Image (tube, helix red, strand yellow):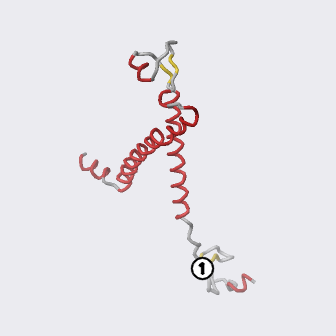
């Protein structure tokens, strides 16, 4: 059983997936830091000196100066500022993934289709070389490619 697990874990797809997950988690942390530490402070300043991480609604009706104070008091809260940060995190990650997939799809341009080297016999439907004048299966005379096109 250990041998089977080792074979499964060391397959290329599993390793690729593990590396992708690790890189995704690291990228998510970078985006979270970007949103919380770089994007939201100036945006909050433009809106009117608002700290989005401290936007919350206390469900007890009491006023708390910060989200940390409300949590310390054990008050239930609706943390719509944290939710806004998480939505922005998601949108940035989704847009980055969209750009990555778009770029990968550009690299995967389809190669031009190879010219066919065979054609179908009009009598027996067998596959015959393009330059053949007789079908090897039914021995019928078949028109040459130039005659068939013209």
- Which residue does the numbered mark 1 point to in the structure image? 128
Q: Position of residue 34 (x, y in %)?
A: 46, 43
Q: Answer with left or right where residue 138 lies relative to residue 83.
A: right
Q: Residue furthest left?
A: 2
The N terminus - image quarter = top left
Q: Residue at x 40, y 44 (%)?
A: 25
Q: Answer with left or right where residue 141 lies relative to residue 44.
A: right
Q: Position of residue 104 (x, y in %)?
A: 51, 60
The relative height of residue 19 versus residue 88 in the rendered view (above or below) is below
The C terminus - image quarter = bottom right
Q: Residue at x 51, y 22 (%)?
A: 78
Q: Answer with left or right where residue 21 lies relative to residue 80.
A: left
Q: Position of residue 117 (x, y in %)?
A: 58, 79
Q: Position of residue 73 (x, y in %)?
A: 40, 15
Q: Residue at x 53, y 46 (%)?
A: 94
Mark 1 falls on what kind of element? strand
Residue closest to the eye, 40 or 76: 40
Residue closest to the eye, 36 or 76: 36
Q: Report which quarter residue 33 is drawn in.
A: top left
């Amino acid at each position: 059983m250990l041998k089977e697990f080792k074979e499964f874990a060391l397959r290329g797809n599993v390793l690729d997936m593990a590396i992708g997950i690790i890189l995704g988690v690291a990228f998510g942390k970078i985006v979270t830091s970007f949103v919380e530490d770089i994007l939201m402070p100036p945006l909050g300043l433009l809106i009117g000196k608002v700290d989005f991480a401290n936007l919350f609604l206390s469900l007890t009706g009491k006023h708390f100066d910060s989200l940390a104070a409300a949590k310390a008091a054990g008050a239930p809260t609706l943390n719509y500022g944290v939710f806004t940060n998480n939505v922005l995190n998601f949108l940035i990650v989704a847009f980055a993934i969209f750009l990555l997939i778009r770029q990968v799809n550009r690299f995967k341009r389809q190669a031009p289709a190879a010219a066919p080297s065979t054609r179908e016999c009009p009598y027996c439907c067998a596959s015959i070389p393009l330059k053949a004048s007789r079908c090897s299966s039914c021995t019928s005379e078949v028109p040459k490619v130039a005659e068939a096109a013209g």
